[in-house]
Amino acid sequence: MTPRELSEVIRKAEKEKTAKLDLSKCGITELPGEIGRLRSLTQLYLSSNQLKELPREIFRLRKLSILYLSGNQLEELPKEIFQLKNLSILNLSYNQLTELPSQIVQLKNLTILYLSNNQLKKLPPEIVHLKKLKVLDLDHNPLTFPPVEIVNQGLPVIRDYLKKSDRGGQLLYEGKLMIMGQGGVGKTCIMERLILNKYTEKQPVTEGIRIQPWELNAPDDAGTTMTLNVWDFGGQEIYHATHQFFLTKYSLYMLVWDARQEEEHERIDYWLNIISTFAEDSPVLIVMNKSDERAKDLGFSDLKRRYPRIIKSVKISAKEGSGIGTLEELVRNQAWELPLMGTFWPSSWLSVRRTLERASRDHIPYKNYLELCKRAGIEEKEARTLSRYLHDLGIILHFHNDLLLKDTIILRPKWGTDAVYKVLDSDHVHLGNGILYEKDLPDIWEDRKLYPPDSYKLILRLMVNFEQAFPFGKGDRYAVAEFLNPSEPRYDWNPEDALRFEYHYAFLPAGVVSRLIVRMYEFLILLDGKPVCWSKGAYFKYRESEAKIRIDQRSRTAVIRVRGIGKREFLSVIRSHFDALHKSINKIRVAEKVPCICCHECEHRFDYRVLSEFERKNKPTITCESSIEDVSVAGLLNSIENSEIRREKMEKRYLHGGMNDSQTRPRKWYQKIFSLKRGA
């Protein structure tokens, strides 16, 4: 729409005393001041234009109750907004707003405020006084006040947080740096060079995780100090499956590799997959150490394409100190952008944190933590947010998503991590092919003051719930899954008539099979009092059925075979355990596969979801890509589960949104109520 056409529309609306004017998607780059003459307007829609600012005359439209400005390029909302006293719905989503004027509090009739997809870092505390506000959409903003965790819990929690901010508190500039990579690449040397500016030629092997604070100045602000809690992860392969439980979101990751090692490219992919899978969208710095001895081309552009969260790659020598200044500056700048950096902590949060840090105990029951929070004026929902923050910053360990571990808060992360890794490093476990006897625990946890006998059960429970170990026999023995014998034990297994099912992974994290074995240890077959399992698989029994599950690391598949009466029921049990395991891994990509039945030797696999869709659309056959024969869809699906179960699953799936079909997903409740179509 040209400026002239726009003026004509405005003049016509003025003449007709129009109450509703829709100028969305008209290509408007500038709104003329004459818009202020439309004194009869109650609804004005200006979404999806190219407006960079608003004319002051727009605030003369005192009858406006609905104003849509979403999808423009507004960087500022003028403070004169307070003049629109009758506004009940204001949509400012998908703009470039960096702040809101405090005058917005004078919009006493505001019930819905859309602010998603802007650049807001903080809300004016006065917003709590908008008593009629029912909907506040803040999705996809880099908020630190209130923090994202608070925002995600909804308007009542946001209001409580903002009210508490009036009672005092402070901005905390704190974050977490995770240093990862293969053993021997120099991670600890880099940490020492960065924090202490020293180099030790022969560093002892890092056992488990080293944790150390690092204070450094904020970028362009020498008066502000940031604190990074640095976690240096041991690179030995036995630790890899355990490390996954300590990878947190909202952290900065440093992946270190050795310029001298030819096979390092493959390992870099492995570690980047680990970070991508378990740490959500955290930023990653790639550091090539020992570049003074040899330098290779990493192929950074290709890596960046495959792993978009990589920020930069830098070459250094921890030994010579070269490149350390550049690395420190990179860390400084990236840490400053972390979501939890510069978060405002109310006085009540600070009080609880100080109490936890002063506590003499290494762990406390979660109920005690809740009582402490309650005394500080923090209710349970907010207390959960605070514990997540403390966990993500590395102050405590609280696995709030674990059914059992959520009942305990570990106040000293190093106490918990060291206890677990001491088991993994124990000669008793190594020499015993992964068998841990309770009688050996005092030898493993030698420091009686640090690990008194009454803490053993908690640590063992920690390992069981980490799916690293499981009890068997009379309960005085545990099998540590990572140390199971690599060779498959002898067992009388006849695969004849066994049903088959497989999981195919885009990336197979370490420990998937060991975690599954621990998760299903009650079903393990015992032979001469010992569980029939090995490092890549296990045999299980359920009623009159037996199953063999094995992992093929090379092809990244989990192969399941089940035989006996009720084998489909047992497969359903196994799949439920796999499903739960997959849900615990943030970004795992896995496909369920059904082996073809066109002939016994066929190696083709059908995608289970595709088969389900064929059945839903009443397509009776599907073509095998190996034999090019038509295969019965019902025959394939009936080989693994009965039709009633499939029907129930299909109904449930489509009731909750269908197969990635955004058109069938339910809209937010307030969108349904108000039937707001424009600019949402």
Image (spheres, rainbow, N blue to C red):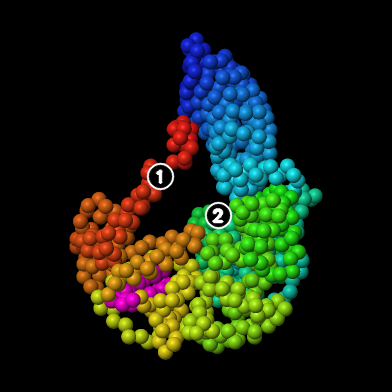
Tell me the residue at 74%/44% (across/down). Answer: 167
Disc 2 marks which amino acid?
A: Asp
Relative image position of residue 487 (x, y in whole percent): 43, 84
Q: Nearer the viewer, mark 2 or mark 1?
A: 1
Front-most of residues 299 and 213: 213
Secondary element at tag 1:
loop
Disc 1 marks which amino acid?
A: Arg
Tell me the residue at 44%/86% (across/down). Answer: 530
Tell me the residue at 50%/26% (across/down). Answer: 45
Q: Is residue 449 visible?
A: yes
- For disc 1, the marked residue is 665
Q: Is residue 354 left or right of residue 660?
A: right
- Circle 1 packing at 10 Å, graded few (<14), some (14-19), many (20+), is some
Front-most of residues 46 and 658: 658
- For disc 2, the marked residue is 281
Image position of 32 with respect to 676: above or below: above
Relative image position of residue 139 (x, y in whole percent): 55, 43
Front-most of residues 63 and 343: 63
The dot on residue 291 is none
- Circle 2 packing at 10 Å, graded few (<14), some (14-19), many (20+), is some
Residue 539 figure quarter:
bottom left
For the view shown, which residue lies furthest in the right direction? 223
Relative image position of residue 245 (x, y in whole percent): 56, 66
Q: CA distance from mark 2 to mark 1?
A: 24 Å
Tell me the residue at 58%/42% (across/down). Answer: 155
| Residue 130 included in the magenta stretch of the image | no
Q: Is residue 338 visible?
A: no
Relative image position of residue 230 (x, y in whole percent): 68, 63
Of the image marks 2 and 1, the number of the one nearer the N terminus: 2
